[in-house]
Image (spheres, rainbow, N blue to C red):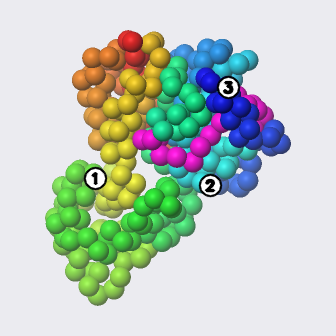
Amino acid sequence: MTDAGNNLLKKKACSPKVRSSNPDSSLAIHIPVLLEEVIRFLAPVDGGTYIDGTLGLGGHAEKILQSCKPSGRVIGFEWDAIALHLAQKRLAPFGDRFYAQQRNYSEIMAGLTEIGICKVDGLLLDLGVSSLQFDSAERGFSFQNNGPLDMRMDKRAHRPAEEIINAYSKEDLADIFYYYGEERQARRIAAHIVEERSKERITSTTQLARIVAGAVPRKYQPRKIHAATKVFQALRIAVNNELDNLTAVLDTVAKILKPGGRVCIISFHSLEDRLVKWKFKDNPELHVLTKKPVIPSLEEIKVNPRARSAKLRAAYFKG
Ligand SMILES: C[S@@+](CC[C@H](N)C(=O)[O-])C[C@H]1O[C@@H](n2cnc3c(N)ncnc32)[C@H](O)[C@@H]1O
């Protein structure tokens, strides 16, 4: 790292005031998934520089910092202002070994350039939403809590789900549900939404969930998940451009890693996992470390049921 980068890390690092995994609110709890496995594949060492591109509440970053002491560093990217604030408080005790920016991980190169760093030893992405976001009704991610149809991770950057649901054509809605939710009843659901919104604007999560459930005859409804689960996943992906962001970062991985540097990606649905699998495979500069994705143990799922769909893939840059 350049001197300028070093100084910036020092200048922007938080002062070591708070040391807690739950610093501001009872909602601020997120159990990091596949924690030991991430450390095994990322293999942080003293003196290394690691990027956590989805900082969240800093659970993985904390473990990486503990594993690369005394002088290894973590640079965090997080586009949710609330999560970033909580992670900065949590990781403040690491002083200038930790630095974070509010930025989309698809712009990692620009973020690194800004602090004078060209190459790093590892990159972690733990995709999806944190429990903090999912459990906050006012963020609108879940139909289990009634809230506004929002779903924006970065409020500055995107339009809320309400706009998509009320303004997009029937065909566009069906495409979103089909391609991002793999929802077989996409056309039927889209048609019903368009009919219902002509009577009354759709503004809340439970209202949308009711409409979706009402669109699909019981015999075609999934047995193990709520009828609206896939539609909510699809909307979240569309609101936050999740697949475009993932594609962008996968295309830059080899440019930001040092030879031997590692990339670990945890995904939570098959669209993401397939993208990671093929981008790793198709990149001759990467050596894949996980022939099959690593999944959580039954013990981990028992403690943290949200880990159940997690899949970790890892690779290193051949250089
Ligand atoms: C599953 S959580 C990460 C949790 C974290 N590993 C921990 O241990 O606390 C995913 C986080 O990534 C953030 N995120 C998702 N997409 C992002 C993107 N394109 N750029 C930056 N942050 C993103 C979300 O706001 C969320 O806080």
Quadrant of res 133: bottom right
Q: Amino acid at mark 2?
A: Ile
x, y percent for residue 269 = 34, 42
Tell me: 260 left or right of 237. right
x, y percent for residue 4 = 66, 30
| Residue 139 visible in the displayed image | yes
Judging depth in this view, the residue of 211 and 49 nearest the camera is 49
x, y percent for residue 238 = 33, 56
Tell me: 151 left or right of 280. right
The residue indicated by pointer 3 is 3
- In this rendering, the answer to whether 139 lies above or below 195 is above
Magenta stretch: includes residue 294: no
Quadrant of res 97: top right
Image point (42%, 61%), residue name: 158
Q: Main secondary structure of the magenta part?
A: helix
The residue indicated by pointer 2 is 82
Magenta stretch: includes residue 102: yes
